[in-house]
Image: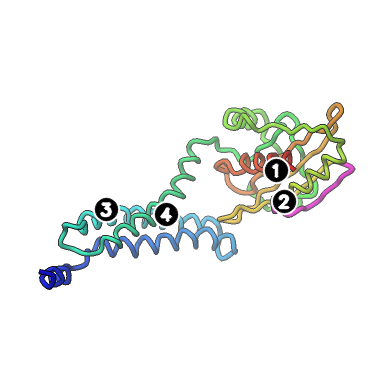
Amino acid sequence: MNAYSESSADAKSVSRPAITSFYLAIVAALLAVLGGFGSRWGWWHFRIGFIIMLLALLGGLIAIVLSIIGVISTRPSATRRGFIYAILGLLVSLIVVGLPLNLIINGFRLPPIHDITTDTENPPRFVAILPLRKDADNPSDYGGPGIAAQQHKAYPNIRPATLNLKPDQAFERALAAARDMGWDIVEAAPAEGRIEATAKTFWFGFKDDVIIRVTSSGDGSRVDVRSVSRVGTSDVGANAKRIQTYLGRFQNR
């Protein structure tokens, strides 16, 4: 009986969709990683990276379909082997598709803006960073009431921070928090209450510029932050998230 079972198992052929889905999912995952980090490392323009990402997304979608076919054809009662390959291919391809798909969904859900600030009426103005943005696709000047209205609707919690600290004390805390964020500090001007820095996104290495303004407010201080992308019409929420993370770290120091 055991010999018969073993010979039956050996007779089962490997499901081609199952094994193909696994290897295609691995290739798609490598393309996804390479598309982003290749742009970050300067191997190619970020638009080439986007094309590579689209290829990864397409490969991941095909891998999902093949994986499902593979799971069905290799289930325990089936006549083909490769169930583990099909499951692994499905898991990897779901991750490959899920990450860029989330960005695409956010791109449609969020407004197409890339300049976020805690003060839309009098946003902090860049000084030291201006030469670094001379070749940037996006201008350093604020877009005005239209941009402000879109920001208030999408990110109503982006507000300045107020502290019961003297401006010089608040400045030192603001500078320390900026360093904790891992930003490249371009200039820190205590007399002007101004800190300018450049942040780099993890995946594609996009450079976004940040300015922090510390002013007196009653018996304490007010801290405003502005974060602006150098390229891209939409930042898919990156600048708002950066400001919120920074202010949280600043207030909890």
Q: Which residue is mark 4?
A: 96
- Which comes before the other along the chain, label 2 or label 4? 4
Residue 181: in magenta span:
yes
Point out the frontmost of discs 2 and 4: 2
Q: Which residue is mark 3?
A: 68
* Disc 3 + disc 1, Cβ < 8 Å: no
| Residues at marks 2 and 3, CA–CA distance in whole angstroms | 45 Å
Q: Is residue 187 above or below residue 1?
A: above
Asked whether 184 or 50 is in front, the reply is: 184
* Disc 1 + disc 2, Cβ < 8 Å: yes
Q: Is residue 144 left or right of residue 92?
A: right
| Residues at marks 4 and 1, CA–CA distance in whole angstroms | 31 Å
Q: Which residue is mark 2?
A: 180
Residue drawn at (84%, 31%), measured in percent from left and top?
A: 220
How many badges with numbers are in the image?
4
Magenta segment = 180-192
Residue 132 horizontal/vertical position (percent): 73, 53
**Residue type indicated by callout 2:** Asp
